[in-house]
């Protein structure tokens, strides 16, 4: 068994589970990143039910963050605005203490983690997971 310090492995569970608050200055940077004016960006990506004064909420598309990509062949997803992602996303840390991460680990790699932080599953599934983590770090 392999003891693990869990890092993000792009399952997208957190991006589908949580509403993302965005500061207005972050919205302006995201609009610039997407090459649209701020009014267009707010209309396209802001949840109109919660316009906020200093913060807005991102609109959910198909039950998830609008910037979360569709699943790739290996089941992982990626953030289309990762370089400019909002602070709420930057502050969220993957870990063995997060139910979302444990769910994603089971869903994508058929693995779980015991109370000592060791991966539980077939060696081939563990190898596939570790290979995916190596690919993400490149």
Image (cartoon, helix red, strand yellow):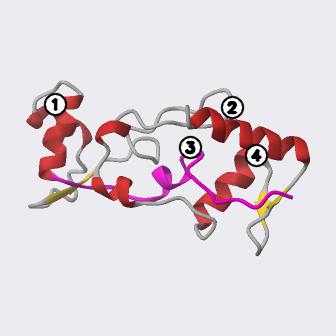
Spatial CA span between label 3 and label 4: 12 Å
The residue labelled by disc 4 is 109
Per the image, is 21 magenta? yes
Instruction: Name the residue at 63% across, 57% down.
Output: 6
Are circles 2 and 3 on residues that touch, CB within 8 Å?
A: no
Q: Secondary structure at mark 2?
A: loop
**Which of marks 3 and 1 precedes in the sequence?**
3
Name the quadrant of the N terminus. Answer: bottom right
Mark 3 in CB contact with mark 4 (< 8 angstroms): no
Q: Residues within 10 Å of mark 1 (few under 14, many from 20)?
A: some
Quadrant, the C terminus: top right
- The residue lying at 65 percent from left, 37 percent from top is 134
The part of the image, by quadrant, that contains residue 83 is: top left
* Closer to the camera in the image, 12 or 96: 96
Mark 2 or 4, nearer chain start: 2
- The image shows residue 110, relative to residue 55, as above or below, that is above
Helix, strand or loop for disc 4: helix
The residue beneath circle 3 is: 10
Q: Which residue is mark 1?
A: 32
Please report the bounds of the magenta region as a residue range: 1-23
């Amino acid at each position: 068994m392999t003891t693990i310090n869990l890092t993000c492995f792009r399952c997208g569970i957190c991006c589908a589970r949580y509403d993302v608050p965005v500061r207005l200055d972050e919205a302006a940077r995201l609009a610039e990143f997407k090459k649209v004016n701020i009014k267009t960006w707010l209309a396209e990506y802001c949840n109109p039910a919660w316009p906020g004064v200093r913060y807005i909420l991102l609109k959910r598309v198909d039950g998830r963050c609008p910037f979360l990509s569709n699943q790739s062949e290996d089941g992982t997803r990626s953030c289309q605005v990762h370089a400019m992602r909002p602070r709420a996303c930057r502050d969220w840390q993957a870990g063995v203490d997060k139910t979302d991460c444990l769910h994603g680990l089971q869903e994508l790699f058929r693995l779980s983690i015991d109370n000592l932080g060791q991966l539980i599953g077939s060696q081939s599934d563990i190898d596939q997971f570790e290979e995916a983590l190596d690919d993400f770090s490149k």
